[in-house]
Image (cartoon, grey):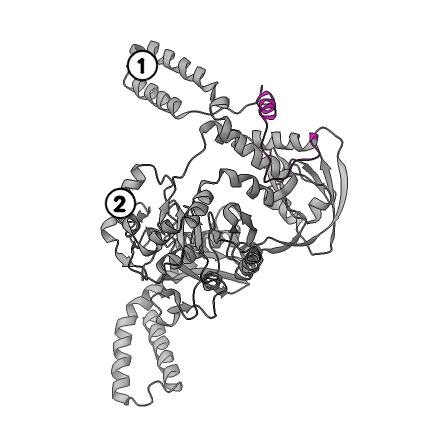
Amino acid sequence: MVNFIVNHQIILKYFQAMMQKNVYRNIGITTSTILLAVLVWSFNEDLFQISKNLDVFASVYKEVNINYVDDINSAKLIKSGVDAMLDGLDPYTEFVPESEIEDYKLKYVSTQYGGIGASIFNRDKKVFVSDVFNGFPAQRADIRPGDQLVKINDIELAGKTNEQVSILLKGTKGAAIKLLVKRDDAAPVEKSLVRDEIKQPNVTYYGMVSGNMGYIKLDKFLENSADEVTTALVALKKNNPQGIILDLRSNGGGILQEAVKIVNLFVAKDVEVVSQKGKIKEKNFSYRTMSAPLEPNLPLVVLVNSRSASASEIVAGSLQDLDRAVIIGQRSYGKGLVQQTFTLPYNSLVKITIAKYYIPSGRCVQALDYTHRKDDGSVNKMADSSLHEYKTKDGRSVYDGSGVYPDIMIKQERFANITQALVGKLMIFDYATRFRNTHTKLSDALTYQMSDDDYNDFVKFLNGKDYNYSTNSEKLLTSLKTEATKEKQFGEIQGEYDILKNKLMASKKNDLQLHKDEIKQVLENEIVSRYYYEKGRYEVNFKYDKELAQAVKTMQDKNQLAAVLKGVGEYKIIGKPQLAAVAIKKGDKTDEIDQ
């Protein structure tokens, strides 16, 4: 009975508010009474369930807090409960307590903070520098990747987590910080730095590449990302480029409005870029270009891969739908959901998925169906039978429910097991550290190529070091042994098994030479970064970048460029489910969606 009274009062207050706003000024009292009765009847059960469940939740918390055998962390307990409640929705709906607000802002809103301009990692309970950003205090103090941080302001770091150390490194711009740094086997050296405002750019690189093409690498869509792309584009236009390459690979997205502004750089004013639609009509909105484009005519290619998501898909998908750009790479991630943050008491907030977004053809790229989970809580991909065909501006066929499928698919290559092991076991990192400490200079990043002598030195460096790994053949052989043992048949095949295992081990010894080219590629990337930082990583990798090479080739071939954008021949249908499945089987797409 109490719940009914509460619900009745809520509805009465709702109607009183509506009447005060003159919403029902011209409706008679009889009609209002009928509406009130209908709403009481239809909303009562929902409101009862809300009230009931909140009461149950509060009661459980109260009893646990009073009676549990050990002391409990109230804040942690409530957060666990809230997280569990939201976990059944989607990965993007999340609660952010006051203690995590700053990290949230860095991740989703702004890239600025006070610090020294270095990233760190934990190894054997010790803290090491993993990367240094050019032009900031750490670089100016000659702190290098591979250096060990022993103390910060006389606080010992041994055993501390990355998060604890990160907190010690960050602080107010202009504040002094003292570091005790150890390099190789030398005695630790004390360095005094002054924290600066660390701003990680959204555009991490731009410049001219082969074929006189302008290249822009956009890493994220946080504050000012559109302004940064504009600055890059203006600078590149001074070189009279033959085309523009916008690289959105591994860009996980960010602010939707920034994506709209970036599209506006290449398409005319008052064109719809994206719309959002949810159950609350007031939150439905269409985003259109607001100004004249900066570059409406130059050939344009957008690079994407399986980790290009959200705002990246808005840019790539809308430019594809408007037949303004050629999309090259692999199928994008498939996140077509829009989030909005709401403030909560005590400086906390909640980020909630409020709508799906739709690009100009009318399609939504969302690839996973969170609404219809399996009984075990896992999520299905959108079934091929549920996907729909849409048309681009000039009539090409595109499809919803599976990310943005590129106009030109490039096979996603994976590094060999040995290369992955050398990276994962930090052998590449350690050798680059040693190389930098013994070589004071390096030729510029664009022309650097590791010599065979240096590669042989790397092979010697590996002697006696643990970089153990299993090949796919070894994994299959181990699986065979396991199954044969279960079936009590291993004894019958053990002789053949041992012979095959020895052959595999002998073959494995040649992996350092068999996969020499790709290992050298990774080594070059890490070594160059020690001299030319993030910019160097991009430049040294240009010569290996197949998607970049295809972008240049496509824009130089005017016939192919026109064929793609006009939908001639094989370019008429993009990502049709049956055709896409054939492409996957052929190995044109190896990365599966994983959320």
Badge count: 2
Residue 129 shows in the view: no
Dot label at residue 579: 2
What percent of the width, then of the height, locates residue 69? 49, 46
Residue contact between numbered discs 2 and 1, judged by CB atoms under 8 Å? no
What percent of the width, then of the height, locates residue 499? 37, 11
Residue 243 shows in the view: yes
Could you say which is closer to the camera, residue 223 or residue 92? Answer: 223
Numbered disc 2: secondary structure: helix
What type is the residue that disc 1 sits on?
A: Phe
Characterize the local packing of mark 2: few (<14), some (14-19) or many (20 or more) Cα atoms within 10 angstroms: few
Numbered disc 1: secondary structure: helix
Could you say which is closer to the camera, residue 16 or residue 334? Answer: 334
From which residue to which does the magenta span run? 438-460
Residue 209 part of the magenta segment: no
What type is the residue that disc 2 sits on?
A: Leu
What percent of the width, then of the height, locates residue 332? 39, 49
Dot label at residue 490: 1
Residue at 56% x, 57% y: name it. Answer: 232
Instruction: Report the quarter where the N terminus lies.
Output: bottom left
Decide: is 311 above or below 515.
below
Horizontal side of 180 relative to 89 (left or right) equals right
